[in-house]
Image (tube, rainbow, N blue to C red):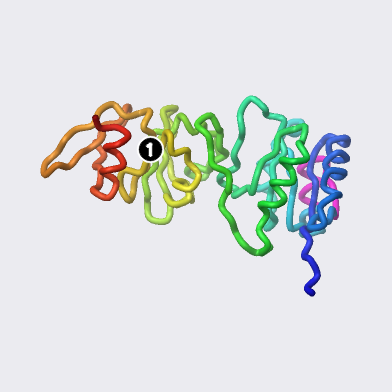
Amino acid sequence: MNEEKKYRTLIVDDEKYARGDLRELLSVFSTIEIVGEAKNIKTAIEAIEKLKPDLIFLDIQFPGETGFELFDKVDINAKVIFVTAYDEYAIRAFDVNACDYLLKPVNPDRLALAVKRLPDNREQQILPNILFTETDSIYLQLNYKYYFVRLDSIIKITAADHFTEVITSKGLKGLTNKQLCEWDKCLPKTSFTQVHRSTIINMNFVERVERGNNYSYRIILKNIEEPIPISRRYAVQIKKKMIP
């Protein structure tokens, strides 16, 4: 019988007691081997370079810095599960392909679910596996700068070769290195709908739907001058949601 593979795990949190509590909670999982702890971004960089962990439990808020800054300062090949005290809204780390996020204090059952979701293949690159909600904020790179973007502020997402262009109601517009299919798997279907093979829109920004030639339709979005055509492939679905 093959020996069970373990995730070599690093805990990064500025609070000593929080690190201890998480270490104790993780001790019941046979697939988790805790190889180190770090109390700030500096010591986390040192630990990552030395220990080469497979999995990192990473706090978001540190004194004067955030856990996201770690990705700009060191190459991370490990899976990442964010641990956050932000209970007013969920921060989804879309751009860094985080596996999951946990709210403090960490619930043992929720932690068990996060561990269960980890892929068996340590080399497998996975997409975020939790469906976003409308009130989520995501950490996203647009035109080489990072932003916290609320999903309900996104007006439309358009394919652009291997990238997508994101336009928000807050004036943000830029390219991000996510393909349209990745967005489609994660966005809440209650608000976001694909209307064309290259376009996803937020239906909350629909101003009106116009009928074109040959029974075609196009959508006018608030703050967007150019009409967006609805392709036949998605017409039936769109009609059910938006067209009387």
Amino acid at dot 1: Lys
Is residue 167 depicted above or below 116 in this figure? above
Residue 129 image position (x, y, % from top left): 58, 48
The total of numbered circles placed on residues is: 1
Residue 140: name its quadrant: top right
Figure quadrant of the N terminus: bottom right
168 or 181: nearer the viewer: 181
Q: Which residues are magenta?
A: 35-46
Residue 79 is left or right of residue 45, and the answer is: left
| Residue found farthest to the bottom | 1
154 or 133: nearer the viewer: 133
Is residue 14 depicted above or below 48 in this figure? above
Figure quadrant of the C terminus: top left
Residue at which label 1 appears: 156
Q: Is residue 75 visible?
A: no
| Residue found farthest to the left | 213
Identify which residue is drawn at 72% across, 39% down. Answer: 83
Identify which residue is drawn at 86% across, 38% down. Answer: 21
Mark 1: which secondary structure?
strand
Residue 222 image position (x, y, % from top left): 32, 27
Residue 105 image position (x, y, % from top left): 77, 32
Residue 169 is left or right of residue 83, and the answer is: left
Q: Residues within 10 Å of mark 1 (few under 14, many from 20)?
A: many
Residue 221: name its quadrant: top left
Q: Is residue 89 visible?
A: yes
Instruction: Say if the magenta span includes residue 61.
Output: no
Identify which residue is drawn at 31% across, 29% down. Answer: 206
Residue 97 is left or right of residue 236, and the answer is: right
Instruction: Say if the magenta span includes residue 43.
Output: yes
